[in-house]
Image (cartoon, rainbow, N blue to C red):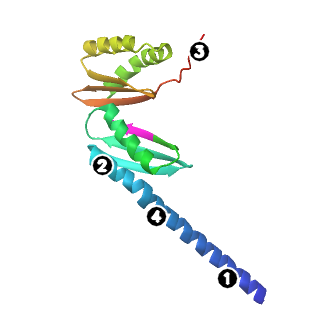
Amino acid sequence: MIRNFQVKYFLLALVICLAVFTGLFRVYQDRMIEKPIREQIIQSLKTDSVEVAKKDGVYTVEVKLKQAGDIKADYAVVEEAASKKIKEENYTISMVDHRTEKLQQDYDDLQLRIYEAMAKDNYLWLEEQIKSQALERKYQYKLYLDEDKLYLEIKNQDGFLYEVIDRPTVTKQLG
């Protein structure tokens, strides 16, 4: 009887400890990782909301922007905030825009050309293609590149669309 009584208390203590440690870990994640990321982004960008969540070991930083700005600079702010607090590069960034059906269609019509330009490393041609379509369909655009990503912003009087696309890694052989 005494042995059975001790097992019950041991199991109860184990469950309580697990609950306390889980709660403390959640508080740590919120106060030391998620909240500082949210605060840094809110201070730097005009946002409707910033959500930071961890699911299946991967953080997602979702930023809903109020208005179009500079897509490359906005993304860099979010990237910097996330990389400071999430040490392992195990996170994704989602920039939520205010896209309309028309802007989505404009982007869909460009998509094949975007991937062709990335495959051929021909971004001047892509710039001409986007410029031509923008003049025809009456929208403004910004196209930026860096070593890792292609940034595209399309906007009109009704909304704006942001797309950040990973560029393929190209290795050149000498010979």
Q: CA distance from mark 2 to mark 3?
A: 44 Å
Question: N-terminal of the two: label 4 or label 1?
Answer: 1
Q: Is residue 132 left or right of residue 171?
A: left
Please, what secondary structure does the residue beneath circle 3 have? loop
Q: Please report the residue visible at 36 percent of the width from the left and 36 percent of the height from the top.
A: 75
The question of residue 25 being in magenta is answered with: no
Residue 152 figure quarter: top left
Q: Which mark is residue 42?
A: 2
Q: CA distance from mark 3 to mark 4?
A: 50 Å
In the displayed structure, would residue 115 be above or below residue 32? above
Question: N-terminal of the two: label 1 or label 2?
Answer: 1
Give the residue number, with chain letter if any, for mark 4: 27
Identified by mark 2, the residue type is Ile
Contact flag, marks 1 and 2 (Cβ < 8 Å): no
Identified by mark 4, the residue type is Val
Magenta region: 93-97
Q: Please report the residue visible at 44 percent of the width from the left and 51 percent of the height from the top.
A: 85
Q: Please report the residue visible at 37 percent of the width from the left and 42 percent of the height from the top.
A: 78
Please, what secondary structure does the residue beneath circle 4 have? helix
Question: N-terminal of the two: label 1 or label 3?
Answer: 1
Give the residue number, with chain letter if any, for mark 1: 9
Question: N-terminal of the two: label 2 or label 3?
Answer: 2
Give the residue number, with chain letter if any, for mark 3: 173
Please provide percent x and percent y for residue 84.
Answer: 43, 48
Q: CA distance from mark 1 to mark 2?
A: 47 Å
Contact flag, marks 4 and 1 (Cβ < 8 Å): no
